[in-house]
Image (cartoon, rainbow, N blue to C red):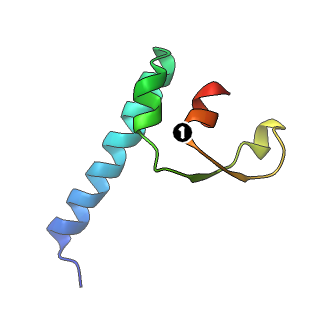
Amino acid sequence: METALETLAARQEIVDVITELFVATDQRDWGAVKRCFADQVLFDMSSLGAGPPARRTPDEIAAG
């Protein structure tokens, strides 16, 4: 079982990556955007009318 400190550290890592992703997107730093993702992710932009969720690479996401 994870300790409270491990859980808090993992949560902070997630927050840091999300913050980096949004800042990099705002700055149009596509290299930094790509580094925020795994090799493939389930990318869901369906709420914006972009079709159903699909597996995408960081290059495909940044190109969009």
Q: Position of residue 33 (x, y in %)?
A: 46, 30
* Amino acid at the residue labelled 1: Pro
Q: Position of residue 28 (x, y in %)?
A: 50, 15
Q: What residue is drawn where x is 24% and y is 85%?
A: 1
The reply, left or right, for residue 49 in relation to residue 3 is right
The reply, left or right, for residue 39 in relation to residue 11 is right
The reply, left or right, for residue 63 in relation to residue 46 is left
Secondary-structure class at tag 1: helix
Foreground pick, 23 / 8? 23
Residue 7 versus residue 32 in the image, above or below = below
Q: How many marks?
A: 1
Q: Residues within 10 Å of mark 1 (few under 14, many from 20)?
A: many
Residue 29 versus residue 32 in the image, above or below = above
Residue where numbered disc 1 is placed: 58
Q: Position of residue 37 (x, y in %)?
A: 46, 44
Foreground pick, 44 / 60? 60
Looking at the rendered image, the quarter that the C terminus falls into is top right
Residue 38 versus residue 58 in the image, above or below = below
Q: What residue is drawn where x is 57% and y is 34%?
A: 59
Outermost residue, top side: 27
Q: What residue is drawn where x is 78% and y is 45%?
A: 46
The reply, left or right, for residue 52 in relation to residue 29 is right
Q: What residue is drawn where x is 84% and y is 38%?
A: 49
Q: Position of residue 56 (x, y in %)?
A: 64, 47
